[in-house]
Image (tube, rainbow, N blue to C red):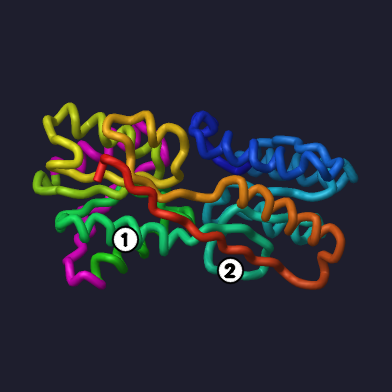
Amino acid sequence: MTEPDWRQFAEPFFSEIVSSLGDALSDTGMQLLLTLVRSDAERQRFLEYARGGRVDGVLLISVHAGDPLPDMLAEARLPTVLLGRRSGDEYVSYVDVDNVGGARSAVSHLLQRGRRAIATITGPTDMYVTQCRVRGYQEALALAGVEGKQTLVAEGDFTAESGRRAMAELLRRHPEIDGVLAASDTTAAGALETLHAAGRRVPEDVAVIGFDDFPLAQQTTPRLTTVRQPIEAIGRAMVRLLLEEMEEGAVAWRHVILRTELVAREST
């Protein structure tokens, strides 16, 4: 994992992904070793450790743009599979979900319910997943002939606190907001807190959609409409690709894009 802020590992996404990888590896006879790599020194230490024959392959989670670790692993000829992508680059094996399509379907859902001042709270903008979801958001607005404003886009970091902060900022900029797509269910939960505190009814005044469909989505008030990511399938696909890389790594890079699904609940 290459997330620079350790606090984000408290978010459900990371624990769910690690659990799915552990389940997928359970019948392979391989042991899952969790390592945090957050600095150049830690990258170098991990590379030396992996080169020492202690690691058969690497499953890399939460990669930001410009992170050199995937390239370092490739140069060391260590079988590696990324969750998501750093960019549109194809020269690495990865498993991703249809983030563009997921965001597009969420915003289309809001538009179909008559919402027109639709904002989005994103993840970190140096992550390809964030760029894809913003593109899906923009595409849905454009297809409906609705003007998209840059000021309706606020950056978060997938946490509840960033959802609270970004939602307050968006309400100050655009008090007319009537729909929000959040980068995660946790971010959406934070946005709901700010909306409730501001006296905005959900969904009557503002409809809210999250991303992930973790148990949290059914524990908020109201329950969250969200874009479901197939977490178990992600874990299985990453392990399958890694085993293929280990067996015949010089043959091809492997890319898997999994579908998302909109799950409608009371928040819209």
Asked if the magenta segment contains residue 18, the reply would be no
Q: Position of residue 204 (x, y in %)?
A: 14, 41
* Mark 2 or 1, closer to the camera: 1
Amino acid, disc 1: Tyr
The part of the chain drawn in magenta is: 143-172
Asked if the magenta segment contains residue 150, the reply would be yes
Distance between the alpha carbons at the discs numbered 2 and 1: 22 Å
Q: Is residue 267 left or right of residue 115?
A: right
Residue 123 lies, with reference to residue 104, above or below; the image says above
| Residue at 37% from the left image edge and 46% from the top image edge | 226
Residue 38 sits in quarter: top right
Q: Is residue 225 left or right of residue 117?
A: right
Q: Which residue is mark 1?
A: 137
Q: Position of residue 182 (x, y in %)?
A: 33, 46
Neighbourhood count class around disc 2 (C-alpha, 10 Å): few under 14, some 14–19, many 20 upward:
few
Residue 155 in view (yes/no): no
Amino acid, disc 2: Asp
Q: Position of residue 20 (x, y in %)?
A: 64, 41
Q: Position of residue 51 (x, y in %)?
A: 85, 48
| Residue at 58% from the left image edge and 68% from the top image edge | 89
Residue 100 sits in quarter: bottom left
Neighbourhood count class around disc 1 (C-alpha, 10 Å): few under 14, some 14–19, many 20 upward:
many
